[in-house]
Amino acid sequence: MARDLAIDLGTANTLVYARGEGLVFAEPSVIALNKRTGEVLAMGNEAWKMIGRTPGHIVAERPLRKGAIKDFDITQRMVRVLFERVGVSRFNRPKVLICVPSAITAVERRAVTEAARRAGATDAQLIEQPLAAAIGANLPISEPVGNMVVDIGGGTSESAMLSLGGVVALEAVRVGSFDIDTAIQDYLRTEYGMAIGEHTAEEIKIQIGSAAPMPVELRAEVTGRELMTGLPKKVILTATEVRKAINEPVTAMIESAVTCLTQAPPELGQDLIAQGIHLVGGGGLLSGFDLRLAEETGVPVYQVEEPLECVVLGAGQCIESFEAMRAMFMDSRPRKVGR
């Protein structure tokens, strides 16, 4: 018997919720291919370990960037492998509800649904990530009260004010945690003449990265390749340097949330003093991000319990009830968001 699936097809990670079973898959959105034969060698955690470590004929890459499909064929193959991993076959093709950023265009929306259908789904519908996140965080969005969600993903950052089951104000920018990693790589290249990989940049962000000054400022030893000689090189990087390096993308994320607040009706804005802003997504785990967001907006900020899983759990709640699923399905009309 086919199972309904909710899929958070993110730039950084892909998560799958199966109706009646809960979360059944949560791994990086990476696929490794043999360019000579076209064979899929790995997906998820195994493929993520291959990034930057493969020979010329093997490529490990993320087929989604900025919340949208970068390579349609590779994305379709990744979704097909994903279906196989969660037990889908040609005899039990599922209906799927896919979480997508609000910032993507109508063409990009159609690409997501088409990739899922070609990979084996009988039907594919979309739900916006801020709405799914609010449901997953168990916010009272059906009541006439302002609820604000800030979702910091790998490729996009979205801020949404919700009330009475709908989105009242929305601001989305195509800046996410991957832009923070890139900013760290650019800083080391410019200031130290050293190249580092994607994994190293992410480790630096996790270890000593911060959006605001912290009580204890840490240091980290970073190993990379010197650009002039091509030889290995080590430097000591401080938290202050990293904060300076990532200030531009972090500021863009904060400004997105502030802009959303300014678009909301005054009555709903007042509700946030009591309700607060709820922070979801892996990018929101950056040290001090919640403190800086609270300082810039003047509103309390709360981390949800499951920031990485919140979106797919919200979509999962929709597929558990057929009526709820129908209510939450998105239409395919484009929506003007962002800047």
Image (cartoon, helix red, strand yellow):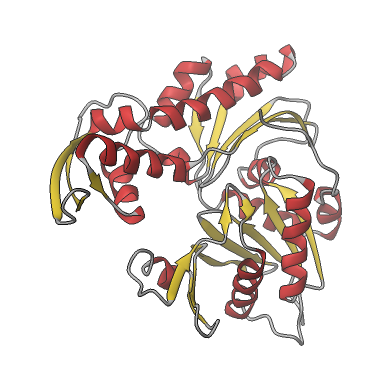
Quadrant of the rendered structure where residue 319 is? bottom right
Regarding residue 320, the answer to whether it shows in the image is: no
For the residue pair 291 and 28, the one nearer the viewer reads as: 28
Regarding residue 270, the answer to whether it shows in the image is: yes
For the residue pair 288 and 324, the one nearer the viewer reads as: 288
Q: In this view, does 49 lie to the left or right of 141?
A: left
Q: How many labels does the image show?
A: 0
Q: Is residue 22 above or below residue 100?
A: below
Q: Is residue 334 left or right of residue 74?
A: right
Q: In this view, does 333 lie above or below 18?
A: above
For the residue pair 262 and 104, the one nearer the viewer reads as: 104
Where's the N terminus, which quadrant? Answer: bottom right
Farthest front residue?
228
Where's the C terminus, which quadrant? Answer: top right
Give residue 32's position: percent from left, percent from top: 47, 73
| Residue in the image at 71% along x and 18% along y | 263
Give residue 318's position: percent from left, percent from top: 75, 55
Give residue 202's position: percent from left, percent from top: 34, 49
| Residue in the image at 51% along x and 27% along y | 252
Quadrant of the rendered structure where residue 121 is? bottom right
| Residue in the image at 70% along x and 84% along y | 89
Q: In this view, does 263 lie above or below 87?
A: above
Give residue 137's position: percent from left, percent from top: 60, 43
Q: In this view, does 299 lie to the left or right of 2?
A: left
